[in-house]
Structures are given as C-alpha cells and as structure tokens.
C-alpha cells in the first residue's frame, strides 16, 4: 500500500513504507518526550509509538501537578492512515532533530496541550541494544537521546498553565524489544532471578549535558555514557560508570532519593553527576508503559480506537493511590531531578530526568553501590 512517506527517495527495502524488514510482531518505532518546571511542582510526558506488524498506533500524555498525575492513553488501528496522530494527540516535525510540535486536543480526560519542543543540544546515539535468550532475539533496537526545552501551554482540569522554557529531554527508539505487542512465549525453564538494574539519566548543567545509561539483566549489561562539554562542543563516551544511591524507605521496589554517577572518561578523568529527586515522579503505567486497563501494555491491538483517562495521587515518593483507594508501588517511574556536575574543571548545576529501577541487593546502610 502506498503512503505519504513513499513520495521520498529514502526507501531502504524493495517495498513500500508500510512494511518493515522483519515479520517480528514486536517491531516498534516510538518517540518520547519529558519536561519539568524548575521547582518540582509540575512535569509532563508525551509519547506516540507505531507498531507496523501489529497494525497499531498508540500514545500517552501525562501531567503531574501538585501531587496528582493526570493520565491520557489512546490507541488506534494504523492502516490506512499513516500519520503520527492518535486520538487527540499529534506530533508535527517542524525541523528534524531541532523543533517538534506536540498537540493534545480536546478530549474526555482532564488535560489538553500545545507544546513546542526545541533542541538545546545535538542528538546522541546510544550503543546498539542486542540480547538473546535460548537462541531467540529478545531485543535488537536503536535509540537516540536529546536535551531541549519546551514552551507552550497545558490545560489541567480547566486551569491553563503557561509553559515558558521548561527543561526537557526526549528519545526516539526503533527495532525489536521484548514484551511489546505480544506476550513473550515460554522457551524453557527460567533460572532464579539474578537481579536487575536499569538507570537512565538525561541531564544538562551550565557546562555539561548528555545521557548516562547503565543496565544489567540476567547477567547481561549495557553501558552508554555520552557527555558533552557545552562550552567547547567536545563530546566523549565514558568507559566505566560507578553508581551509589540512597532510597526513600526499605520497601520494594525501591525508590531513590539521591544518587551519584561517577563517569570515567577515556583519558582516565572522572566526572561526577550528583542527582536529587525533585517533586513527584511519573508512574509510567499511566503513560501506557505496562499499563492500559487490560494490563497488556504497549503495542497491543485494541480495536479501531480506544481512549482511557484517570487521575492518580502520586504525592508519596514511592506509593501511588488510585481513584478506588487501592495503593501500589510501581516499578517503572521517571523522576525529575536536580543535577550537580563536579569535575577537575569545576562545578555546575542544572536539571535532569532519571529512570532508576534497582532490583538488586544493597549494603547494610541501605545504599546501592554498583559499577558498570
């Protein structure tokens, strides 16, 4: 089937753009954005993903304000409409890798928005993600990350909030990833869990910016640490990252209150990034990550069109309270943070966004110490 992208000279397969180079139903292509104010009172996230082999487009928009998380989740059938729109949500690329417009039109939920995302740093490519289990590919995908700013407005329960140059970040990933679109098949007896760790920091200060990502799952690790000196434009990739973290309590899953990432540069020098939680964290189930009311997560076919919305209490640093009074400690949360950068060249301060999932053992004093 011919679609709008076919009217371009960028084909990479001898077929039309409505096909991808694998029949794996988990193939995805997703854009994600986050922004936060300077005092921890408010933050937002916006995402749209396309799953060509599942014939699905889905998206989510979340605003956290004064301890309440306003959720909107939407999904639609992809074909025949090849557009980055789903329900009231849309992404318009004004200038690639520089300026994108994010829209959330009127809907049955409690939020609407008109936002302009502008880059303040060049995009950075992560190291490729690839992992197998018992001969089967679990993940094979690419992602780039970028620091920027957001301006515009968001309407929360009829209260219009003007947004002027909020700190922001985004990523864009595509490929094959586990637990997307379909349940993972059983391919053998599972060994006892060895613990998992995933930390993903976006940040920028007056002098430095970039991202640090450290992961470990079933003994397989991933490291990408790309830091840019904003004053000179020089970028380097860290070769090792040591982490420490402190947690808000002893509950599981653990929620951090502060953490330090010590990034060893190729020349042996170390840049320390000290982060402190600022305001409530986004519970990612509200955005659709592992969420939707059917509990099946992203990429699932849910008919020609679906809208879901609700408001959660996220004022506690670890516990989420739902409208029916139930409480939970979601594993996947993304936290706005204050960042202090320390190196031999000096100290600078700024903002960031940190995902930190630590299902690993900690010291007797309740601190995590980990190297990747």
Image (spheres, rainbow, N blue to C red):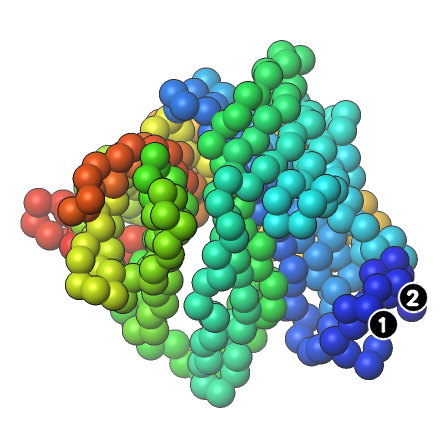
Q: Residue furthest left?
A: 364
Badge 1: few (under 14), some or many (20 or more) residues near its Cα, within 10 Å? Answer: some
| Location of mark 1 (residue) | 16
Q: Which mark is drawn over residue 2?
A: 2
Q: Which mark is drawn over residue 338?
A: none
- Asked whether 285 or 216 is in front, the reply is 216
Q: Residue furthest top?
A: 159
Q: How many marks?
A: 2
Q: Compared to 61, does 59 lie above or below?
A: below
Query: Looking at the picture, how far across and down is residue 333, in whole percent?
Result: 42, 42
Q: Compared to 141, does 32 lie above or below?
A: above
- Asked whether 231 or 140 is in front, the reply is 231
Of the image marks 2 and 1, the number of the one nearer the N terminus: 2
Tell me what residue is drawn at x 55 percent, y 41 percent.
119
- Asked whether 147 or 159 is in front, the reply is 147
Query: Looking at the picture, how far across and down is residue 83, in whole percent?
Result: 81, 50
Query: Looking at the picture, how far across and down is residue 197, in whole percent?
Result: 31, 59
Q: Quadrant of residue 22?
A: bottom right
Residue at disc 1, secondary structure: loop
Labels 2 & 1 near each other (Cβ < 8 A): yes
Which quadrant: the N terminus?
bottom right
Residue at disc 2, secondary structure: loop
């Amino acid at each position: 089937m011919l679609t709008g992208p076919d009217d371009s000279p960028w084909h990479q397969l001898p077929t039309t753009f409505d096909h991808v180079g694998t029949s794996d139903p988990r193939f995805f292509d997703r854009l994600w954005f986050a922004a936060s104010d300077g005092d921890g009172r408010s933050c937002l996230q916006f995402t749209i993903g396309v799953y060509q082999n599942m014939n699905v487009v889905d998206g989510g928009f979340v605003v956290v304000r004064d301890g309440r998380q306003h959720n909107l989740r939407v999904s639609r059938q992809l074909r025949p409409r090849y557009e980055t729109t789903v329900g009231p949500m849309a992404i318009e690329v004004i200038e690639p890798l520089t300026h994108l417009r994010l829209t959330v039109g009127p809907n049955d939920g409690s939020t609407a928005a008109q936002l302009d995302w502008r880059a303040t740093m060049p995009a950075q490519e992560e190291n490729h993600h690839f992992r197998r289990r018992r001969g089967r590919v679990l993940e094979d995908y690419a992602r780039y990350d970028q620091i920027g700013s957001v301006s515009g407005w968001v309407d929360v329960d009829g209260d219009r909030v003007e947004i002027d140059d909020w700190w922001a970040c985004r990523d864009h990933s595509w490929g094959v990833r586990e637990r997307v679109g379909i349940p993972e098949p059983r391919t053998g007896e599972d060994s006892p869990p060895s613990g998992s760790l995933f930390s993903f920091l976006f940040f920028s200060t007056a002098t430095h910016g970039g991202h640090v990502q450290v992961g470990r799952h079933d003994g397989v690790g991933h490291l990408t640490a790309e830091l840019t000196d904003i004053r000179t434009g020089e970028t380097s990739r860290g070769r090792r990252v040591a982490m420490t973290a402190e947690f808000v309590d002893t509950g599981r899953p653990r929620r951090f209150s502060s953490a330090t990432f010590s990034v060893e540069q190729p020349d042996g020098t170390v840049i320390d990034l000290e982060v402190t939680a600022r305001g409530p964290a986004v519970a990612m189930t509200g955005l659709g990550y592992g969420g939707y009311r059917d509990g099946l997560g992203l990429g699932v076919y849910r008919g020609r069109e679906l809208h879901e919305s609700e408001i959660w209490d996220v004022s506690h640093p670890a516990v989420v309270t739902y409208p029916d009074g139930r409480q939970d400690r979601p594993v996947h949360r993304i936290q706005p943070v204050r960042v202090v950068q320390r190196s031999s060249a000096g100290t600078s301060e700024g903002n960031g966004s940190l995902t930190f999932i630590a299902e690993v053992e900690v010291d007797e004093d309740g601190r995590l110490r980990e190297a990747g």
